[in-house]
Image: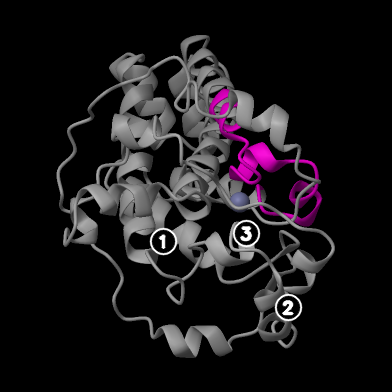
Amino acid sequence: MWLGKLYNQSAQKATGKQDIFGTKNRQKVLLPCRYIIPTGENGASLLKKKAQFSPALGIIGHMKEKYHRAITEQALRPHFDPAALEEVIRANLGQDVIRYQFGHDHFHYDNNSFAAGDAYIEEQRRAVIQTLQGGGPASLARAAFGRLTHTAQDFYAHSNYTALWRERHPGAAPDAIHPYLAEVIQDSRLTSGRIYPPLEYFSFIPPLAPLVIPLLPRDSHAWMNKDDPSRPDFAYAYAAAVKRTEDELEQIRRALTPQQISAFQMGNGANEQSRNR
Ligand SMILES: [Zn+2]
């Protein structure tokens, strides 16, 4: 989500607002407001934590892994068996490995890469559906699904969607957020955090962050992100990401037979192979 290439404002602004959710362009998605926002975390203590490094995945970041995992588990645990869910989560977290922090703005909706982010989600969604419809390995479908959930979740953490939604719903609680409000999606002020190298990179080094962040513009990733509970609107971004993740699963399920859904959500290892035959 965060380290990225130089921002090409003219090109990305020109196309960034047209089709934010691909060809679906849905006006309303009815979702139950029953999602739980984590309240146990203390923002101040989280701020003191060092950036995390996961040897398994090579992830470096500010608690990102923890929240992508929590969002994905909350949305999908009722539907997936544990092993299948873990495959989805691993693919989700894999999008934040260091090599995907450069030149992959569309994985994270950084630098106003709205059109490219939408296209990426659509591409991964197609891969999930086609793999399952063709009787291919469900683990490949779960990996593609994990990748798209990461991008979908980053949309709320890296854009000003939550601020524009709250402007229209003053006083509304995080659980009330709608993840696809058309007038917000089409708002000309919708932007996502811009990466300002090299200064932005130093903002990810905890001891340097307090020195560097004040020097960065307000439209930078450092100022705009809602990646952890210390950030304004984190609870709104979290709630929207949970709803969106659940809805992404629903979209896929609608294209599949019950048997294909079962292979996707329940399959693992040898069982999966026999189920797919
Ligand atoms: Zn990301």
* Residue at the far top in the pictured view: 134
Considering depth in this image, is 10 or 201 the residue closer to the camera?
10
**Position in image of residue 121 (x %, y %):** 54, 29
Earlier-in-chain disc, 3 versus 1: 1
Asked if residue 77 shows in the view, the reply is no
Q: What's the residue type where badge 3 is placed?
A: His
The verdict on residue 62 being magenta is: no
Q: What's the residue type where badge 2 is placed?
A: Val
Question: Start and end of the magenta stretch?
Answer: 95-119
Q: Which mark is residue 212?
A: 2
What residue is pinned by disc 1? 70
The verdict on residue 102 being magenta is: yes
Name which residue lies at 35% across and 15% down.
Answer: 256
Q: Secondary structure at mark 2?
A: helix
Q: Which mark is residue 221?
A: 3
Q: Residues within 10 Å of mark 3 (few under 14, many from 20)?
A: many
